Image: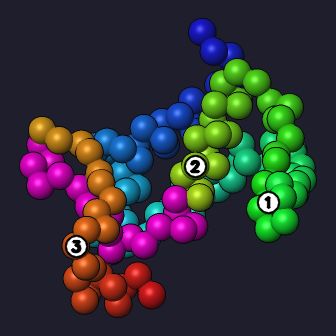
Amino acid sequence: MFPELDIDLLRTFVAVVESGSGGPELDKLVAGGKVSDDFIKQLNHPLAEDVFHETLHRRGKTDFHLDRSASRLSGEKLALTILSRQIAHFLGEANFCYLHRCANTTSCVLYFYDTDKPCPARKLAEAK
């Protein structure tokens, strides 16, 4: 159906958000662990295929805007690259002590980022 779709990468992304034998990467982070090197390698693969440039523009005296060129990718490759980039940004910028999973893991597969409560001291120390 999708001959150029990277099925292994798609399975890895699915494993990010659901439990099971796929190796749920977010579960590892919630438990204070780390994502696998293989997962990072799979995220980097579509990122390496996308070539773009960014240009800074001035809007008034002290207001600026950064424009990014359009991607040369399309279809499934573009979708996987966008998803990879968003996951990479999250991993690079998130404070994992705020990352939680629903308490009832048998019926709920959702994760949430809760900054309303302070990080537990243990998780704050692990995040550093």
* Residue type, mark 3 in image: Lys
Q: Is residue 114 above or below residue 124?
A: above
> What kind of element bears circle 2?
helix
- The residue drawn where x is 77% and y is 62% is 63
Residue at the far top: name it: 1
3D distance between C-alphas at marks 2 and 3: 24 Å
> What kind of element bears circle 1?
strand
Lower sequence index among marks 3 and 1: 1
Residue pointed to by mark 2: 86
Q: Which residues are magenta?
A: 90-106
Residue pointed to by mark 1: 64
- The x, y position of residue 68, in whole percent, is 82, 46
Q: Is residue 126 visible?
A: yes
- The x, y position of residue 27, in whole percent, is 31, 58
- The residue drawn where x is 41% and y is 47% is 16
Residue 25: quarter of image = bottom left
- Which residue occupies the foreground of this view, 33 or 110? 110
- Which residue occupies the foreground of this view, 97 or 38? 97
Lower sequence index among marks 2 and 3: 2
* Residue type, mark 1 in image: Phe
Residue pointed to by mark 3: 117
Q: Is residue 104 above or below residue 107?
A: below
**How many C-alpha atoms fall within 10 Å of the one at disc 3: few (<14), some, or many (≥20)?**
few
> What kind of element bears circle 3?
loop
